[in-house]
Amino acid sequence: MRRKRGEHGQVLILAVVALVLVILAVLLLFDVQTVIRGKIKGQNAVDAAALTGAEWQRHSLNLIGELNLVRATGALISDPYFETAVLETYRDADKFFYDVKPSIRNRSDDFLTFPEKDDFLIRDPETGEEIGLNIGLLQQSVRRVEKERFYLDTLDRLVSQLQTRISFVGPLIGFGAAQQAAKKNGISSDRDANELFYMYATQIGRGGSSIYTTHLPQKINDYAWNKPYGDMLSSILDISDNRAHGIAAGTRFQFSGMPTLSADPPSEFTSLLGNKSFYDSINGRNWCNLDPYLHLDFSGSWWSSFQCDYESSFINQAEILPLHITFSYFSPEDSNQRTPYDKPTTPFYGAADHLKSYARTEGIISGNAFQDTTDPYGHGFRHKYEEQPQKPDGKQETMVTVDDSPFSPFPRERTGEEDTLSDLESINTWDLSEFTPEQLKLFLDTFLDTYNDEDTDRRYTPIPIFSWAIYDFEWDPIGEETKRLWEGEYLRGDFKEGTDYHSGAKSFFETQQQTATISGNMGRTVNQPQPQASDYDRIDRVFFPNNKTETEMEEDAKKNAEGVSNALSRLEFSVDKIRTSAMAKPIGTIKTKKGTIRPFDAGRMVLPVFTKTTLVPISLDPPEGISMLDIDWYYYLTEFVPLLSGCPTLEDAWIRAAAEHKDHLHYYWKYFKALVLISDPGFRQRGIDWLNKVVVWEKDERGNRYPVKTNRDVNCTGKGESTPSILY
Amino acid sequence: MRTRRKGERGSAIVETLFSMLLLFMILFGILQLFQLALADMIADYAAFRGARSASVGFRERIAEREALIKSVPASGALVYPDYSAYGDYQFVDSEKELLKNYQQSRQNVQYAYWSGKELYHTNYLCPYYGEPMTGTCSNCCHSTRVDITMRPGDNTVSDEVFFEFKFRKYPLNIPLYDWFTDQDSDNDSENSHPLNIPTHDGHTKQTTVNISGRSRLTDYSSAFLQ
């Protein structure tokens, strides 16, 4: 049948319409699939990164713990009374000494010991009366013991240096390995994280005048950490073609030079401006969150007292994935950080004493092997500690030397400076002849008398104080209230014994991916426009006066109103990247010989007890610091806030920022926009109106309606059971 | 040119109408299937997120909340709170904040397809219809609902958590489908998955389908939870 003229293409139109619809639907499916796949891939990658980082933290802590044991072993086997104590304690000690450890049995019996007191005394052969001192024997003994003590002290320092090296290197290996784990799981290098990491790395180990080279100690426990640390950071950054490619998964970290906000004088806004979620609440019109602040007086230059400060402290170890260990002598005078290993009244044997005490308490050594110690030096010297003058700041001096004794057994105060062999030389040339016989007699009376005490722990054992690697204050048991909340409300079981702690070594990672979707974003945000480079120019034209008068600026603004509005819209609605995060930590407990489970830090000393790494809920142990992915926040704090404090209006600050940091405007645009909004009384009033709007009415007997509940009552108070802020 | 005979007038219009009807039935049927596929992907993702939440030790109600939030793109309309009350409401950011509040239990949020679960004070579920949903809701709410199952996995070698997220009676309006089927709407047992398509849900004639996503992950919490 011949088709009539004009009937051509009817089906084609229908087919095209149908085809377009089907294609759009298929594209949407592709997009959704892409986004979901990206989210699952990102989560798996960040889980892998977090577990890898935590695994290296675990290895590092265990290594440091092993070295503590090496140090402890050094202390114990050099203690001339250790053998006696063990023999008294264990029935099978003979086997230990004579079968298993013949080397211990064969060691020099006079290691770190003095001869008997009588051996120094020259007596009249006939009457037996004391007629003098054997100065030669005394000098020889003192030199020998001091030399041996020096060896032991050197061992201690070497171990400390090794532990410090591990505390720098181990976490960085973990961080680098985590990047590989993330990449192997399909996450590519992240521009923001690389940029922030690059800025951090360039401050370290490259000379110059950064805080790392000018204000921080260049050696920690004799380890010159700066350059190797910087080199490792550079290696991880993997710079090629003038771009860094190394970082795929960022972490959250606190670092020297980290920007923080402060206000001088302090103001009620202090907690707001430094709080990133405050800006999110404004931009999201979260009136419930903003409720407490909508009535504040935001008129005038309320931001002018703000300034950006920089963190100046340093944790003396890697700042990325830190282990949060410290050494027992670092801050002995600070009572808040004092540990059982810093005992100012008994500095000489404090460490050994508390190691023994710890060992007994924890059941590692049972029975009465080691008695509680009192003052092993005799009462003559103890009072000298108690009478030490306080420092001007009220803190007590701890490492003191007894000035009137030439044979002070107390170790020299650690200065962190390098040891040299001159120390050994000074021992060799130590000449007792410069001391008076009275002083020498004093030495014998005070120390060697106690030497003969039957209580071995009261005898003179010149072991130096060891600087044990211990957990710092970040390692903390979960408080009772938090524990009750988590066990009762959030978790589906109680904590295993010894695992209810906040970990100092936490491995938190985040990844972000730009989704390459066809429609822009998934589900409800389909087809949101993407920001364009010209958007910033449009905004610039309004806020950039270019020496125009206010009237001209106003006219300019009106002309550009529509364009600016669209530009702002695009910026605000720009599609978010897919962000995923996870946290893992090492888990460890101490199992005693009796089978009792104790927390990993029962003695605060780092021990090789970490057996597992596991993912944990982020909210249980929230990480602190700046996220490597939040480069916008970093620039906002470091670039925009300093400008803000000197500007009378927000627009002035924007203009200055555009002049000085034009390339970074897009980083702090959303924060600036939030400041503009919250400063607007109309905006705040809209929030107040919404909160006060009556949404539930009831009728009285006459049928008149009366208000019962407002949005604030209904919408700002959750009716469900409480939950943590992050649910994974 | 052939002249049209008497009686043939309008036949082209009728033919076109029939062919268009058929074409659009097929077209919209395909689009419904796309929607179904989309919901299926979202259900998979929700199950994954629920399992991830459970794998770090969260109890069921929290893992469930996490899964629900992730199922929002396929959860129907937001029925509570009333968005129009937000004044200068901005779609994306506001809803993000809203969900954050829901997640942290600061606000009650309800999407149409969550209703069967009777979550968190159900009298807020159907405000538009002026009556709370209690037990059976005849007219006010969708009969679609979410069912969630969480239990230990059956792997005997390592600890696992199993999480299933299911949309029950998800709307699937294939045109004229119920002309050809006559199934009992209550027949939505486990065995009927995945494409049980009951035609009557007891109150409204609506073609529905059960959609489920399942996920099984390592239970990391066994390292620190009893």
Image: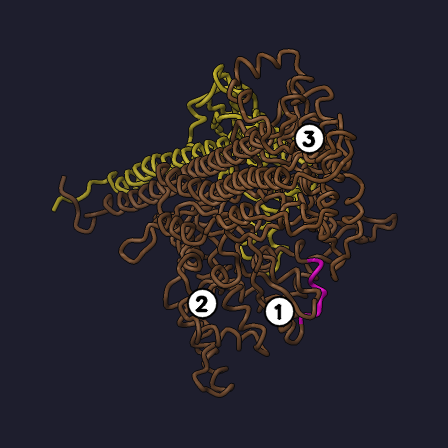
Chain colours: A brown, B yellow
Instruction: Assess whether residue A176 is covered by the magenta stretch.
Output: no
Residue numbers of the magenta segment: A291-298
Q: CA distance from mark 3 to mark 2?
A: 79 Å
Magenta span includes A292: yes
Residue at mark 2 to residue at mark 1: CA–CA distance: 20 Å
Q: Which residue is mark 1?
A: A306
In contact (CB < 8 Å): disc 3 and disc 2: no
At label 2, the amino acid type is Leu
Count neighbours of disc 2 (C-alpha within 10 A) and say few if under 14, some if 14 to 19, many if 20 or more: many
| Residue topped by disc 2 | A665
Q: Which chain contains the residue that carries disc 2?
A: A
Between B174 and B19, which is closer to the camera in this rendering?
Answer: B174
- For the N terminus of chain A, the image quarter is top left
Q: Give x and y (percent) for residue A715.
A: 69, 49
Q: Main secondary structure of the magenta part?
A: loop
Kind of residue sitting beneath label 1: Phe
Q: Which residue is mark 3?
A: A116
| Mark 1, secondary structure of its residue | strand
Residue B191 drawn above or below residue A692: above
Type of amino acid under label 3 = Glu
Give the residue displayed 43% in from the left and 70% down from the top: A661
Q: Nearer the viewer, mark 3 or mark 2?
A: 3
- Can you tell which of label 2 and label 1 is closer to the viewer? 1
Name of the residue lying farthest toward the left = B1
Please tell me how crowded label 3 is: few (under 14), some (14-19), or many (20+) other residues with Cα within 10 Å.
few
